[in-house]
Amino acid sequence: MIPIDEETEYIPLLSEEEEEDLKKLNIPDVLPILPLRNTVLFPGVVIPITVGRDKSLRLVQDVYKKTKILGAIAQKDGNIEDPEIDDLYKVGTVAQILKILEMPDGSTSVIIQGRKRFLLDDLITEKPYHVAKITPLEDEEDEPAGEAKAVAAALKELSIKIIKLSSNIPTEATFAVKNIESPSFLVNFLASNSELSLKQKQELLETNSVAKRGFTLLESFSKEVQMLELKNDIQTKVKSDLDQQQREFLLHQQMKTIQDELGGSPQDQEVIEFREKGKKKKWSKEVAAAFEKELDKLLRLNPATGEYSVQVNYIQTLLELPWNEYTRDNFNLKRASRILDKDHFGLEKIKDRILEHLAVLKLKGDLKSPILCLVGPPGVGKTSLGKSIAEALNRKYVRMSLGGLHDEAEIRGHRKTYIGAMPGRVVQNLKKVKSANPVFVLDEIDKVGRSAQGNPESALLEVLDPEQNSSFHDNFLELDFDLSMVMFLATANTTAGINPALLDRMEIIDLSGYIVEEKVQIAKRHLIPNQIVNHGLTRNQISIPAKVLEYIIESYTRESGVRQLDKHIAKLVRVVAKYIAFEDSYEKKLSRKTATEILGPPRYIRDKYDGNTHAGVVTGLAWTSTGGEILFVETSLSQGEGKLTLTGNLGDVMKESAVLALEYLKSHASKFSIDTEVFKRYNVHVHVPEGAIPKDGPSAGVAMMTSITSAFTQRKVREQTAMTGEITLRGKVLPVGGIKEKILAAKRAGITDIAISVENRKDVEEINEIYRNGLNFRYVNEISGLMDFVLLPEKVDQPMKVV
């Protein structure tokens, strides 16, 4: 709204009676026309105008002497000095001159009041000023009076709100608006004093309906209220922010003055401490330069900002990392050997590899640490071996579990610009142990996950590459860190899930399961003493003989490692501890009977050889994640159409082995004195017991071949004989894996003879002789040689013939 002149002593207002008088006013048909520049006169409204044009001045003076009535019409363009009749709008307002004022500067001001709207018809004369014929205009009479009043009330409320929100309108205007009773005059008064453009005001004047005029004003005032409220909110917020900044500035200035009096600010002291610590670090010139640059950046930051704490965190990380800080290796090889033997029974391969590394290091003085990967079933001591190696080498020990890791940033870290950013777990662990050459165990490397955040295996490629890890780049540090002296020791249950590129960078060492004798020794040397200490007993309070341990191992556990065995021993010790606490009598030297009472009935029945009383029954050897096992393959024949049926929850590879064996036998039937017609007249059913357990793999190929051949020839299989190997359609016997585990399973079952591929000879010879004692190995290259060995010459019955 246009501000009302503060020097005005009064605002002329019309009552409803005066407005009625205006409507009844006789308006002449011909009126002198006064052009108005940049303003529109509304009925009932009083406005001052400055008269400067000669024509207009003469018109005002002539009219003031006579009727004081004239026609006021707005110019379309206010820049035209001498407007023609076409330069004026067609609708204007009849005006009455109230007063003429001569101003000190020589100009003339005229106060006029609008009376009634009119339509400009025809121009009568242009000199000495415009005189025209007019037609008075009336407001619409048929519109509801209630609607106009409602619009007026809303306008009054909005206009008062604008006056309160605006700093340019005096508060006295509120009283004027409140005292206007007539809806039409209120609309005209507010329209005249609004911030609408000249064109918009003229459109309002030309509108015959008071309610429509009011609605247009309502729309304009609503927008103005919103703008004023937003403007006030912004001003309040800016003022508040400025006040807060000024307050903080003053407080900081005061704090700085106090700190200067006390001897320096904490920020400066912190930087000095950082710089002193940096001088003691053994880092390279590049890292030292980067450190100084970050310190200078810290000095330029305001301690109150969030970036300051991020910068401090980064500098502290740099200072806490062990740059070129190494522990001294202990080159006493005999001591190292004693420590490894003391903590772990067996595991000769890995122990020899560590001692070899120490020996070369002792002779050469400098050697990049190997990257070893221990692969074996759960519970064989892969993870705990890392601690023993660290103790033997006199190095720090750190372990990082990779199981379920799915974000690449866990390895490389986040960039320090992110909120809550931190280094990767490799760098964090090195910071924790404060050594750049620890034994670093990467546990469960075969269980690394993948996600949209990247593939952690790709980041591990750099960590585990001896040619690259001397300059490992962490995203948080943005500096290269040397990992070449770290001895990485990865563990996995199987290599199947490891990225081939990652596998190629590591030295694989297989840790197979323990035999019963080894488990007994592990229990006597490690498990029982540990549980006795953990339960607060002494050695003379409990004793578990070797025979009882062997019974527990065979009857209550089925594993390659010793975790379940350790739990069962813990249960025995707990029961003894309870007897002692209750002061009850008990058997100090536990027997098999006592063990059964405590542990319950045996959970597993030891795999035993079933004998060779039936043709078609063969003993095979299998590898599982818990170690080796024996399995039986049974074949029976029944009259039919030569259909092959396979049961026992077999996988695709195992089914293919059975099909392969049968096809080979069909094509070489004459070699085994079998009539080829029997294959068309008999159905073949191959079954592998324990159908609830899924079975798959190519190593049962020779067992399938032997079982089917035995059934068709009715020749029994050699006693105490087991076999493993893959077959081909050409009759070759191929090598398979898991030989040690399979040999242990055969030994547990009482097997004496094992038939395997000739190419597995090297695997057998690598196995410690203690595992091979009592076993005879028959190396075969072809199926025919296998059959000659495993099938007895005598027959249970005649070979199958066509009936």
Image (spheres, helix red, strand yellow):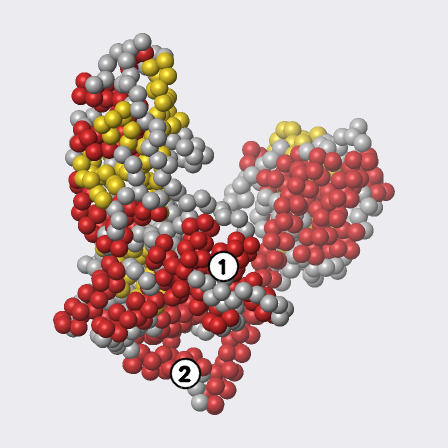
Along the line of sight, the residue nearer the viewer: 80 or 660: 660
Q: Is residue 284 left or right of residue 95?
A: left
User: In x, y percent, where is residue 581?
Assistant: 61, 70
Q: Quadrant of residue 443?
A: bottom left
**Residue at the spot 17% in from the left edge and 47% down from the top edge:** 762
Q: Are marks 1 and 2 in contact (CB under 8 Å)?
A: no
**Residue type pointed to by label 1:** Ser
The image shows residue 692 at horizontal and vertical percentages of 45, 34
Q: Please, what secondary structure does the residue beneath circle 2 have? A: helix
Residue 49 in picture, x, y percent from top left: 64, 50
Q: Nearer the viewer, mark 1 or mark 2?
A: 1
Residue 389, placed above or below residue 751: below
Q: Residues within 10 Å of mark 1 (few under 14, many from 20)?
A: some
- Where 502 sits versus 9, above or below? above
Secondary structure of the residue carrying numbered label 1: loop
Q: State the image quarter where residue 670 is shown.
A: top left
Residue drawn at the location 20% of the way across and 21% of the way down: 672
In the shown orientation, is residue 150 left or right of residue 544? right
Q: Residue at x 76, y 35 (%)?
A: 27
Which is more toward the observer, 130 or 127? Answer: 130
Please state if 64 lies on the left or on the right of 320 as rendered: right
Q: Residue furthest right?
A: 17
Viewer can see residue 62 = no
- Disc 2 crowd, CA 10 A, few/some/many (<14, 14-19, 20+): few
Where does the image place residue 261, in percent across and percent down from the top left? 47, 90
What amino acid is at disc 2?
Gln
The residue tagged 1 is 591
From the viewer's perspective, tell me whether residue 782 is left or right of residue 408. Answer: left
Q: Tell me the residue at 23%/52% (across/down).
A: 767
Q: Against 723, is 270 above or below?
A: below
The C terminus lies in which quarter of the figure?
top left
Q: Name the mark on residue 269.
A: 2
